[in-house]
Amino acid sequence: MYVKSRFLKKLILSALLLSSVSAAHASSTGLMNVTGSIFVIVMENTSWSQIKGSSKAPYINGLLTNIQASYAKNYNNPPGNHPSLGNYLWIEGGSRFGITNDNDPTNPANQIWGQDHFVKQLQTAGISWKTYQENISGTKCPLSSSSPYAPKHNPFIYFDDVTNGFSAASAYCISHVRPFGELTSDLANNTVAKYVFITPSLCNDMHDSCAPTNDRIKQGDNWLKTVAPMIMGSTAYKNNGALIITWDEASSGDGPIGFILLSPQAKGSGYSNSIYYNHSSLLRSLEMNKGLPYLNDANNQTDMSDLFK
């Protein structure tokens, strides 16, 4: 009897283990099936409570019920991680790399040397990437502020490998950090990279109040109303791609801030959850999708596979 009992216990434990592994695998299936391009748009300085249900953001609120939309109710910037630059760096590398200000990378104290980060991982793995930044010329690596372009919202140029040692003449930087206006033709020609990071200008990302609306939330919503359908209508998105819209940090405190996933692989139809996420969760999910090692705090946070099928 003892032998039989022990055997049955082993069978039950094995079944439970198999069930938990299968459930974990199933929860990440949709995330792993995102084989098209992944687009990430980062907006600015706005808590989710200022967006959800706001008459100033009708387009964003309309997106939440889209058949291909899932969203997170408890997505946050990492605890105490302010100002902006630290959050952009966190999305890129799971750390602020000791930087606690918004200074340009022309400042030696804001230069990151020899560190692994996401697009460096992509480059090593032979996976294409590009960032589109509003209001840059495309003729040089944009290391210096020139409003409404802000380097603090362009994390890639803070790394020495992207900029060939922080050179404005870096050919690698110039080829990967491109003017936003080129996105339209790249989508139409289906020549977009596998990972695409998009930064609106200070007027369009909800950072500043500018003409014509003089309302930062409304203007950002209008900008997304133009850009998101263009991306979602592209082959790169339709072929199991994904569009992620999020914010860098809350208007006060650490959140929650907005996180909206649009994808043919999303659970969709306005599915949402209250799981705690932060920028490390996004990075972990991006690395999981590409089969890459987790960097820094991405090792410690929950991935976002629950938002996928």
Image (cartoon, rainbow, N blue to C red):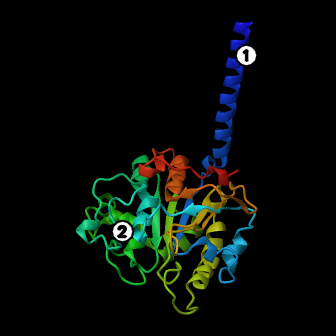
Residue 92 occupies which quadrant of the picture? Answer: bottom left
Q: Residue furthest front?
A: 2
Quote the CA–CA distance across marks 2 and 1: 64 Å
Can residue 218 be seen by looking at this rendering? yes
Mark closer to the chain start, 2 or 1: 1
Relative side of 259 to 166, left or right: right
Given residues 42 and 76, the one toward you in this image is 76
The residue positioned 52% from the left and 75% from the top of the image is: 251
- SS assignment at label 2: helix
**Which amino acid, by three-letter code, is at mark 1?**
Leu
Q: What's under tag 2, amino acid-wise?
A: Ile
Measured from the top left, where is residue 23 in percent x and y? 68, 39
Q: Is residue 83 above or below residue 263?
A: below
- x and y percent of residue 142 in the render? 34, 74
Residue 193 visible in this rendered orientation of the protein: no
Q: Which mark is residue 174?
A: 2
Q: Is residue 118 left or right of residue 204?
A: left
Quarter of the figure with the N terminus: top right
Quarter holding residue 161 = bottom left
The residue labelled by disc 1 is 8
